[in-house]
Image (cartoon, rainbow, N blue to C red):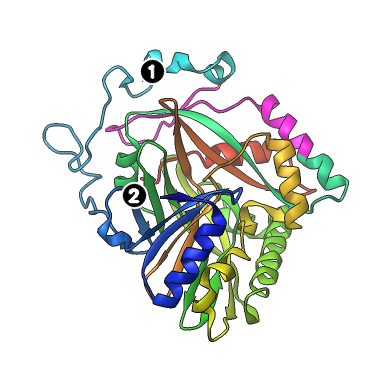
Amino acid sequence: MFFHCHHIAAKMNEAGRAKTPFLFAVNFEMSEGFFIENPLRQTGVLFHVNGITNAEQVSNANQMSNSGRVSGVRKVLSSGLVSSVGQVSNAGQAFNAEQESNVEQVSNAPVEFVFTRYPESFETYEKRFRCAMDALRAGETSLLNLTIKTPIVTSLSLRDIFERSKAKYRLYLPEKFVCFSPERFVKTRDGKIFSHPMKGTIDADLPNAAERLLNDPKEAVEHEAITKLTRDDLGRVATGVKVNRYRYIDRLKTSNGTILQTSSEVEGTLPADYLQNLGTLFFKLLPAGSIAGTPREATLRVIRACEQQPRGFYSGVVGYFDGENLDSGVLIRFIEKENGKMYFRSGGGITIDSQCESEYHEAIQKVYLPF
């Protein structure tokens, strides 16, 4: 199932010409991914791409039955892992002292499950942030996405999280990761290509949150940069590229509360024969600019130097082709499993005007479950 990316591009070309449906995903480093023909007949890898899914939906996942278990969810409380909300058992001892001192129990999470995060210290994040700022001041990059890896303890399995999540783009690989992303990468429809870069986040409970988000100079510069990057990227594969909507607001409900995020819609016209080279065309757009930065190649070098660990499938791309049109999402809001432990990957855009403390809290705020 897993292939090098140049093999995936070739398989996408073949399927595009034959108009064969497929599911695919590519990691951030563009070193590997997977490709599955006719995925609606498959059950191992579960996906939901903007309404198309191969998994039975759990319609009553948020309702408690008389027995106190969540109907339709296979595992609610894992004995020996978490005994009750706010009370962590020996599982918490697997993390180091710094992480334990920063433990945060998500207080407004529904009582039927536990979700506890162990964010890295501000001092640890600050070292990574300073690395990014040095590159910005040196002119190596004008915008980069800086990410963190947060250990979590939850009473839910990866599949439980997939089944309960509400998100446009969801993907579950057994014993590897689950993703519940709100962000589209690109979509094709009737010879057009669309992208919706998402940049800019604020706590919706803050006074005048929408106005504060739209009027924040740093957020405005960041969003302008990523929209321009997206416009330039689409110009590599399409003509007549234009911005249809600029900085519109989406409201997202999370286990941390509601957040507001700004997005824009960029559109272009594809060549008449684009299905003949669907994979080749698609790979010209990778990795997604919204989770890399600009200029792309130089920013990728900065990201490797500052983060000092591969992202893998986190911040890669997942997509589904129905035989005529393709829709794809960015693999953010991502939980991976390594050696029996779970980690939540999150991050945010950094510009020359970024403030370390604000960026630190934004990255942690994005560690949530979408229910």
The boundaries of the magenta stretch are: 102-131
Where residue 81 appears, x then y in whole percent?
33, 20
At which x and y percent is residue 8? 50, 59
Q: Which residue is mark 2?
A: 45
Residue placed at 59% from the left, 17% from the top? 98
Tell me residue 186's x, y (percent): 53, 67
Which disc, if any, is residue 99?
Answer: none
Would you place residue 250 above or below residue 340 in this image?
below
Q: Amino acid at mark 2?
A: Val
In the displayed structure image, the side of residue 65 where residue 92 appears, left or right: right
Label 1 crowd bin: few (<14), some (14–19), many (20+), radius 10 Å: some
Name the amino acid type tagged 1: Val
Front position in the image: 233 or 205: 233
Judge from the rendering whether residue 263 lies leftward or rightward of residue 105; answer left or right.
Answer: right
Figure check: 27 above or below 82 = below
- Name the quadrant containing residue 177: top left
**Viewer-proximal residue among 238 and 276:** 276
Viewer-nearest residue: 77 or 308: 308
Check if residue 120 falls in the magenta segment.
yes
Residue under the point 71% across and 64% down = 224
Q: Is residue 277 magenta?
A: no
Who comes first in sequence, dot 2 or dot 1?
Answer: 2
At 75% across and 45% down in the image, what residue appears? 301
User: Where's residue 97, x and y in %?
Assistant: 56, 13
Q: Quadrant of the C terminus?
A: top left
The residue where tag 1 is placed is 88
